[in-house]
Image (tube, rainbow, N blue to C red):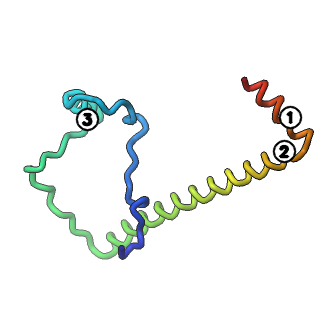
Amino acid sequence: MDMKLTPDDLKVPAPKFYKGPFDMTQDERFKVLKLLDARPFAFDEKLPPEIHLDQSEAIRVIQAFERGRQGKLRAKHMLDLKKKAIEAARSEESKDEKGMTNRAAFIIQRL
């Protein structure tokens, strides 16, 4: 709340290579984890000791994460603008008879 982050900002997406069937057995999951050089976390394990940073290091870490968050937001905004521009161009093409002919030719060639 203090950082004014939404749940979407905090969501960690699944890697694209891991978005396969989710009916894997536990053994298959452990094989994937071993392949990725990861290990499952057991709840009875002790957490690693806390890392204590001095103020300047903490500020650098926070600034790096904030720059990354803003970069993601900017990239998403630019993608939305690009999509809107493409839609506007398509709507202009559909108004023009020559544009409709070109669009139809493009679709036929693609198929």
Label 2 sits on residue: 93
Question: What amino acid is at disc 2?
Answer: Glu
Residue at x 44%, y 66% (from the top left corner)? 66
41 to the left or right of 4: left
First along the sequence among labels 1 and 2: 2
15 to the left or right of 55: right
First along the sequence among labels 2 and 3: 3
The span from disc 2 to disc 3 (Cα, nearest Å) is 50 Å
Badge 2 element? helix
- Residue 13 point in image, percent of width and height: 40, 48
Q: Which quadrant holds the N terminus? A: bottom left
Mark nearer the viewer, 1 or 3:
1
- Residue 99 point in image, percent of width and height: 87, 40
Mark 2 nearby-residue class (10 Å; few <14, some 14–19, many ≥20): some
The span from disc 1 to disc 3 (Cα, nearest Å) is 50 Å
Which mark, by number, is residue 33?
Answer: 3
The span from disc 1 to disc 2 (Cα, nearest Å) is 8 Å
3 to the left or right of 25: right
Residue at x 25%, y 35% (from the top left corner)? 33
Question: What amino acid is at disc 1?
Answer: Asn
* Labelled pair 1, 2 in contact (Cβ < 8 Å): yes
Instruction: From the viewer's side, name the closer residue of 85 and 100.
Output: 100
Q: Quadrant of residue 111?
A: top right
Residue at x 18%, y 63% (from the top left corner)? 50
Which mark, by number, is residue 102?
Answer: 1
Badge 1 element? helix
Residue at x 41%, y 68% (from the top left corner)? 5
4 to the left or right of 32: right
